[in-house]
Image (cartoon, rainbow, N blue to C red):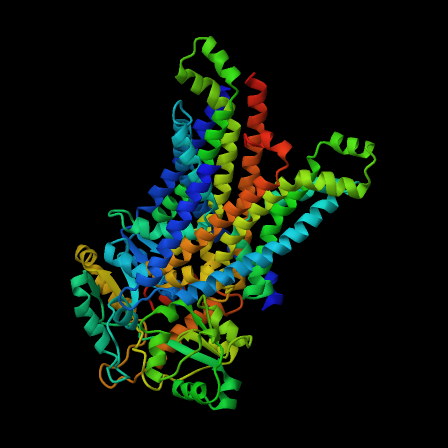
Amino acid sequence: MEERVFQATWTYINSHWSLILNWTLQHLQMVAIATAIATLLGVGIGIYIAGEGRENLANVVVNMAEIMLTIPSLALYTMMIPLLGSIPGVQSIGMVPAIIALILYAQMPIVENTYTAIKEVSPAIIEAGRGMGMSPREILLKVKLPLAFPVIMAGVRSAVVMSVGIAALAVFVGGGGFGIPIFRGIRNLRVDLIMTGAIFSSILAVALDLIFGVVERRLSWRSRGGGE
Amino acid sequence: MTGKRIMSFVLITLMVGFTLYFTFYGAQGWYSPASGRDMLLRTWEHIKLVGIAELLAIGVGISGGLLITRPGLEFLATPVTTIANVGLAIPPLALVAGVSPFFGIGPRPGIIALFIYSLLPVLRNATVGIEDIDKSVIESARGMGMSKLQIFTKIELPLALPVIVAGIRTSTILCVGTAAIAALINAGGLGQIIMRGQSVNFVPLMLQGALLTAALAVTLDLFLSEMEHVLTPRGLKLNKETE
Amino acid sequence: MKKALVFLLIFSVALSTFAIIGAAAQSKGKLTIGTKDFTEQWIVGWMLKLLLEDRGYDVNLKKNLPSPTLRAGLESGDIDLMMSYDGTAYTTYLGRAYKGEGRVPWYAFPWALKVLDKPNGLTWITDNGLYVNNTWALCVKETWADENGVHTISDLADYINDVEQVKWAVGNEFYERPDGLPALQETYGFEVKRSELQLMSIGLTMRQVDKDNAIVGMIYGTDPHAKAMGLKILKDDKGFWPPYNLFPVIRTDTLDEHPEVREILVEFAGAFPQPEMLGGSETYPSAQRTMMELNHEADLSDPPKDPQEVAEEFLVEHGLIEG
């Protein structure tokens, strides 16, 4: 079987471009919804805990996020399913549980980065803003956030890349994406399916990583250039 | 640091506690949870998978990192770190699945996949750690009459060690998680318990595997971040504290 | 600096728009069909989808669900319709003990399930069925079977008890389920040593046998790989397993809403060979062969066809839809 891996994979890929596109879109859809919500949520939480007098809360949240990130995705995913299933009214099959689990995982790096980035804005700059008569709100929106932006984007980037990897496990709850060919391949001894899923999910992850890398570099260059 | 330590302890205790609870009281109707013996066996398998892959990765990664930072080979450093970074974006499931058509199924292909994956952070950090050492420090050491070997063992290695250990930490955590997925290609380990539970949607069984895997990851993370802390030269600690 | 903020705004808006469009496109379906996670289920799932779409329904097909997740979804209303195996439903979903030893006639199961599942809000449509008997089975290499004279599971039990332990490769589900290995051991009176037992994803088991990493493997009755790999399926001579025939199971409230679906499902199942009501033999070779051929086309033909293609061809061939 092994000798024919490449040939079989190539034949399969060549005749199934539309299906592959379909899987890509399903995969992207999960990742997009999850990271969009996780970004809003994560940045919100990050800003909130970076506020004055919330150091204790911040400590707890950031440490929690750090620890949660070490928990293997398969394990977290597995724990999520019964938890979600016990909430009445929440769909237990399909994209919804897959996405909720993704959101929970993906916001960890975003919270962490947002908090760290805001905290690291130099006190001198904040003082300057205050001196110019800015309200705390203005300081947050016009000084802290723009300066923190590249770091926040770095958090979003790692959230996106992680999500691509984790979304491949969504098949366990009937979600779509590249998990489908991989699992069907393993289940039915189809190397061509396994390889197609593996190759294209990797391409997707690497491509998103590179795109976000470029965006991140651009932004950090700009905010350094424009922020001073 | 202490906050994290306490939270980790609490979490580990909770997770192990629940695992024990499910092991002894998890039976529901026909279905029974994995026995204590089974859990121990699978945990041991998991540790073995991670241990072998990680030790190989540490050996190859550090020596690779040292090699490509030698004068004359430095041009390799940037491409290697880039490749390592890109490689880390590959979903673990894709790697595990992609290995099986070539190497078959069982613990050995599992270890191969784990090794490839855990090699990347070690290699990257070893390279970056040594590259980032202030060149003037090495210059002054040379000025003091140190030999190449002495510079290597007394300056480069100790200074790069915290970064290398950080790489080992990242890599170990990834490895624990990927090993769980490797159960798909019959590599054994705690992932096996998760898959068994998933195949019949029996929650206690799923949780037994998941909680213990998570506990293992958090424990190793805690242990290795302590190591990182201990190994950081005292002079660097003040600067590092902000991170 | 504003540019960065504008970018963030555009980024999230774009992502959410994408998300909403995607979500809207998904929720149009009137009927949600779920399938289990192997080829046969994909094929019958696609058959239902194509057929019902042809008759004017919007169908959402959720593939690849683990069997109990699928059943839970059907009971909770996330899924409207599935193709269910009667033996699985009887022993596993409803948790009934089966010690029939082959004496319970095949047609008793669909009738019993019709009654048993009524309180669960599910309707079994049993006028016609897919009598494919996709049972669990044990396989060994043909050469090994001939050398050691092992042709039935009783033979295997004797071999294990009298000669030696052999290595087993079985699926996770088979190990856990009430109609799986532990009960099988009890019925046939043998015990597999834990150290000889490998658990894995279903599908890898026959590969282990093929590569001599295991002697006995678990396999499905309609799996085409057994034939292709020269594996022998051991006869279940004590009748441990109930039949595993496929019937459409639909939520009663969905059926009340769309009563015409019943006719379509009956017509669909009728496209497979039906046994005679009385005097049907214990297995249904022709329907099983039909299903095995369909599975073969989807997994082993060169190049393999998509389950969707296989399903479409079957429906066209039987005049259920137009090509």
**Figure quadrant of residue B106:** bottom right
Q: Is residue C72 above or below residue B219?
A: below
**Figure quadrant of residue C89:** bottom left
Where is residue A188? Give x, y as percent.
Answer: 47, 66
Pick the front one: C61 or B52: B52
Q: Is residue C61 left or right of residue C251?
A: right
Identified at 36% across, 68% down, the residue is C176
Quadrant showing the C terminus of chain A: top right
Where is residue B157? Give x, y as percent.
Answer: 70, 42
Where is residue C223? Give x, y as percent.
Answer: 43, 73
Pick the front one: C129 or A107: A107
Would residue A31 be visible to someone looking at this image? no
Where is residue B93? Give x, y as percent.
Answer: 50, 54
The image shows a total of numbered marks equal to 0
Identified at 30% across, 58% down, the residue is C52
**Figure quadrant of residue C313:** bottom left
Quadrant showing the N terminus of chain A: bottom right
Q: Is residue A227 left or right of residue C49?
A: right
* Residue occupying the far top of the picture: A132
Would residue B119 be visible to someone looking at this image? yes
Q: Is residue C108 above or below residue B148?
A: below
Q: Is residue C305 above or below residue C106?
A: above
Q: Is residue C315 left or right of residue C163?
A: left
Pick the front one: B18 or A89: B18
